Image (cartoon, rainbow, N blue to C red):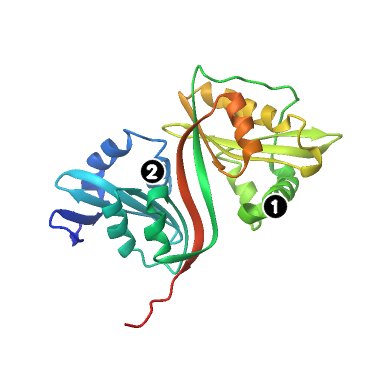
């Protein structure tokens, strides 16, 4: 077991997740996999780029923080835990997601360049309302350039730096589908199976082809495939994107949790 790092409070101990602590880690996150999805996913599939800190109170986990690729941070737990874990976060630039009640503590340390309310939606098998009204095609590497063009145009804030090489590399482990009109790709979506849930990752439609039900057909197709093997599907959506939320609700997704999401830089410490 790694050496304990003591935080504020007599019983609080902040420790790095190591193999000897995995049993209590998995027991804790399996109680609410949607809430801890990226902790499970990155620890299992991207461990070489992932660091997780646990706040232990005896043998009980009160919260945790994931740091992926030295830039992406996920924070969970009580307010006391959040403050203690944030004290140990030394990144100058972050992309950070946490329950909304931790926003105050995050803004004490980081200045956002981008911030949103992020909604997690969940769909359980048997509650889906599949509505595929348009022909869906399987996409491959030959479609990568058109996929990138649609994603960048649909949401330059999140996908402005996506590259063709990144899309091609992901295709081996993910399911990419689309809708084509006269041979031109106009709507895309992707999903992946995991050990716990099916994850709808990307949905994007060319702005000239919106409001025609393409996104509904894309998501329906992805959900049908995911729930053919899994009991639960999840999707994230920005809280200020009502059209997307309506599409997902129409198919059966329900709001599950909301988070504070931000990208930003560390505030300069004022001299004392």
At horizontal 60% and vertical 29% (from top left) the residue drawn is 222
SS class of the residue under badge 1? helix
Horizontal relation, residue 47 to residue 162: left or right: left
Query: What is the quadrant of the C terminus in the image?
Result: bottom left
Residue at horizontal 46 percent and vertical 61 percent from the top: 71
- Disc number for residue 44: 2
Could you tell me which residue is drawn at 35 percent across and 34 percent down? Answer: 32
Which residue is more in the foreground, 251 or 18? 251
User: Is there any visible trace of residue 175 in the rendered image?
Assistant: no
At horizontal 77% and vertical 31% (from top left) the residue drawn is 212
Left or right: 125 in relation to 160: left
Regarding mark 2 in the picture, which secondary structure is present there? helix
Residue 189 coordinates in the image, percent (x, y): 65, 37
Q: Which is more foreground, mark 2 or mark 1?
A: 1
Residue corresponding to mark 1: 152
Quick one: label 2 or label 1, which is nearer the N terminus? 2
Spot occupied by residue 223 in the image (x, y as percentages of width and height) = 58, 26
Residue 234 vertical placement versus 146 (above, below): above
Quadrant of the rendered image containing residue 13: bottom left
61, 162: nearer the viewer: 61
**Residue 13 visible somewhere in the drawing:** yes
Left of 185 or right of it: where is 38?
A: left
Of residue 121 and residue 66, the one placed in the foreground of this image is 121
Q: Give the quarter of the image for residue 129.
A: top right
Answer left or right for 67 relative to 198.
left
Structural crowding at the residue carrying mark 2, measured as other residues with C-alpha within 10 Å and reported as few (<14), some (14–19) or many (≥20) = few
- Alpha carbons under labels 2 and 1: distance apart: 29 Å
Please, is residue 122 above or below residue 184 in the view? above
What mark, if any, has residue 190 been given in the picture? none
């Amino acid at each position: 077991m790694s050496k304990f790092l003591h935080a504020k409070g007599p019983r609080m101990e902040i420790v790095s997740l190591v193999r000897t602590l995995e049993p209590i880690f998995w027991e804790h996150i399996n109680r609410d996999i949607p809430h801890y999805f990226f902790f499970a996913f990155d620890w299992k599939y991207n461990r070489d780029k992932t660091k997780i800190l646990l706040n232990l109170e005896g043998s009980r986990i009160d919260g945790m923080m994931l740091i992926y690729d030295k830039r992406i941070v996920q924070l969970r737990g009580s307010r006391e835990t959040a403050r203690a874990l944030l004290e140990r976060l030394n990144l100058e630039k972050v992309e950070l997601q946490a329950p909304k009640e931790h926003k105050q503590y995050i803004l004490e340390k980081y200045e956002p360049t981008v911030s949103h309310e992020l909604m997690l939606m969940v769909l359980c098998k048997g509650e889906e309302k599949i509505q595929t009204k348009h022909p869906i095609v399987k996409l491959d590497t030959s479609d990568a350039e058109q996929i990138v063009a649609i994603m960048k145009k649909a949401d330059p804030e999140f996908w402005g730096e996506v590259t063709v090489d990144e899309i091609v590399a992901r295709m081996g482990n993910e399911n990419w589908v689309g809708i084509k009109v006269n041979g031109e790709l106009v709507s895309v979506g992707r999903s992946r199976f995991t050990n716990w849930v099916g994850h709808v990752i990307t949905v994007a439609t060319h702005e000239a082809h919106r409001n025609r039900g393409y996104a509904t057909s894309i998501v329906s197709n992805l959900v049908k495939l995911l729930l053919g093997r899994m009991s639960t599907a999840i999707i994230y959506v920005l809280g200020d994107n009502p059209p997307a939320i309506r599409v997902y609700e129409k198919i059966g997704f329900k709001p599950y949790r909301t988070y504070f999401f931000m990208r930003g830089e560390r505030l300069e410490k004022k001299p004392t």
